[in-house]
Image (tube, rainbow, N blue to C red):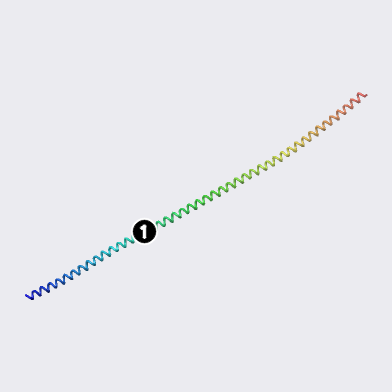
């Protein structure tokens, strides 16, 4: 009777130990599973964070690149506009210089013509004066010749009348 109780006590004690061991194993396994789940979650979160960070870095790099490209395009456009303005100004200046030169040449041609015309007018005037002088002289000479002729005629008449 006592042996049976002892055997039963030993068996119960053994069962208790085995249950305790089982419980410890189960707790260990649960802890390990929990730790694995936690690590997996942390890894996923880190990966997501890294992905978000990489995406944000890519976005920032893209934005920086876009800003730089826009600036470069603006600078190129400004340079082109400045070049076009300079070319337009140079063309205008060249045109103005050409117009001024043409106006000066036209003025010089006009002045030369005027000087020549004045010279010709002067020559014509001198020629006219010379012609007038000559005509006056000729008229006077003709008048004198006529007067001499009249005087001669009178003399002949006088001689004839007196004779």
- Name the outermost residue toward the bottom: 3
Report the quarter where the C terminus lies: top right
**Image spot of residue 20 (x, y percent):** 17, 70
Q: Residue at x 36, y 58 (%)?
A: 56
Residue that protrudes farthest toward the left in the picture: 1
Question: Are there few (<14), some (14-19), or many (20+) residues within 10 Å of tag 1?
Answer: few
Query: 158 or 62: nearer the eye?
Result: 62
Q: Is residue 65 left or right of residue 88?
A: left
Of residues 57 and 103, the one nearer the viewer is: 57
- Position of 87 with respect to 151 (left or right) is left
Seen in the picture, residue 44 relative to 12 is either above or below; the reply is above
User: From what the image shows, is residue 141 above or below residue 44?
Assistant: above
User: For the residue labelled by badge 1, is the local secondary structure a helix, a strand or a loop?
Assistant: helix
Q: Is residue 160 left or right of residue 52?
A: right
> Would you identify the image quadrant in which residue 30 lies?
bottom left
Residue at the disc numbered 1: 56
When the figure is inspected, residue 71 is found, relative to residue 38, above or below; the finding is: above
Residue 55's x, y, as percent?
A: 35, 58
Quadrant of the snapshot with the N terminus: bottom left
């Amino acid at each position: 009777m006592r042996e049976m109780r002892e055997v039963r006590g030993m068996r119960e004690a053994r069962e208790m130990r085995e249950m305790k061991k089982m419980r410890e194993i189960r707790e260990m396994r649960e802890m390990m599973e929990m730790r694995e789940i936690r690590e997996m979650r942390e890894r996923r979160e880190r990966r997501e964070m890294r992905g978000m960070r990489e995406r944000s870095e890519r976005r920032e790099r893209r934005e920086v690149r876009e800003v730089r490209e826009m600036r470069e395009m603006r600078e190129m456009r400004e340079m082109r506009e400045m070049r076009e303005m300079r070319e337009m100004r140079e063309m205008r200046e060249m045109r103005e210089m050409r117009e001024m030169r043409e106006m000066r040449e036209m003025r010089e041609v006009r002045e030369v013509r005027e000087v020549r015309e004045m010279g010709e007018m002067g020559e014509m005037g001198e020629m006219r004066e010379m012609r007038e002088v000559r005509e006056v002289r000729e008229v006077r000479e003709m008048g004198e010749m006529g007067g001499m002729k009249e005087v001669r005629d009178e003399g002949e008449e006088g001689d004839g009348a007196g004779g």
